[in-house]
Every structure is written in C-alpha cells, then in structure tokens.
Image (cartoon, rainbow, N blue to C red):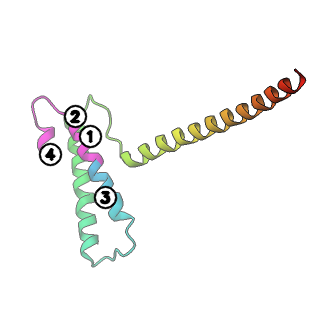
Amino acid sequence: MYSEIGVEDYEFNKCLESAGELFEKYDKLKNALDINKGSSYFQLLSNLSNEYKNFEQIYNIACNYSSPLVACPRSSVTKNILITIAIIFVAASILLGVSYKVNNKELKKNIIYM
C-alpha cells in the first residue's frame, strides 16, 4: 500500500481498495472472541492497527486533494444494497399477486353475468 501512494500518477483507487481490505481484516480480528493480551492474535491486531494509522497519515499527506480515507467495509455496504433490493422485489411480488387475484375475481363475476 505504501508503494502505491508514492507512485507518480497517484493511484488513489488502489490505495483506497487496499485500505478497505486492511480495514476488513482488522475488523474480523477485532471481533474475534479469544483475543488475550499475551496472544499472537493481539500482537497481530496491534501491528495492523499501527500500520493502518501510519497508512492513514501517509495517505492524508500524499493525497491531500483527494477524498478522505473512510473506514467503511465494502461487505456491509453490499449487504445493505442487497437487502434493500430484496425487500423491493418481495413487495412488488406481493402487490402483483394481490392485483392478479382481484382482477381474476372480477373476471369471474363478469363471466357469470353474461
């Protein structure tokens, strides 16, 4: 990640993508249940935390005119979008089913009166 910041053409998208991956890995480790102060997981977590802070400082210096570094995991954003689409799809299906039933009953009434 550090080498991508120093590139002459400043590949900001790669930097943000790498930072997002780092944040996701950090978040997974942080949410683990068996992290004690003496464990290797804790050491790894603290190293990742320090590296992320260093990366954020370097990013802010090198990319000062770009968008700020946001620690938002991509997976949660994707989940929110998929859940919203699923809810809309289910609601539309229910409405179409109800309208079909209503129209079908009206057609049966019209056929009986003919």
User: Would you call the spot at circle 4 few (<14 residues within 10 Å), some (14-19), or many (20 or more)?
Assistant: few
Q: Nearer the viewer, residue 102 or 14?
A: 102
User: Would you call the spot at circle 3 few (<14 residues within 10 Å), some (14-19), or many (20 or more)?
Assistant: some
Image spot of residue 107 (x, y percent): 79, 26
2 and 1 marks in contact (CB < 8 Å): yes
| Residue drawn at the location 36% of the way across and 76% of the way down | 34
| Residue that label 4 marks | 2
| Residue that label 3 marks | 26
User: Would you call the spot at circle 2 few (<14 residues within 10 Å), some (14-19), or many (20 or more)?
Assistant: some
- As helix, strand or loop, the secondary structure at mark 4 comes to helix
Amino acid at pointer 1: Leu
| Residue drawn at the location 22% of the way across and 51% of the way down | 54
> Dividing the image into 4 quarters, which one contains the C terminus?
top right
Image spot of residue 16 (x, y percent): 26, 40
- As helix, strand or loop, the secondary structure at mark 1 comes to helix
Amino acid at pointer 2: Phe
Amino acid at pointer 4: Tyr
Q: CA distance from mark 4 to mark 3?
A: 17 Å
- For the record, the magenta segment spans 1-20
User: Is residue 17 one of those drawn in magenta?
Assistant: yes
2 and 4 marks in contact (CB < 8 Å): no
Instruction: Say which of marks 1 and 4 sits in front.
Output: 1
User: Is residue 45 one of those drawn in magenta?
Assistant: no
Q: Earlier in the sequence, mark 1 or mark 4?
A: 4
| Residue that label 2 marks | 12
Image spot of residue 94 (x, y percent): 66, 39
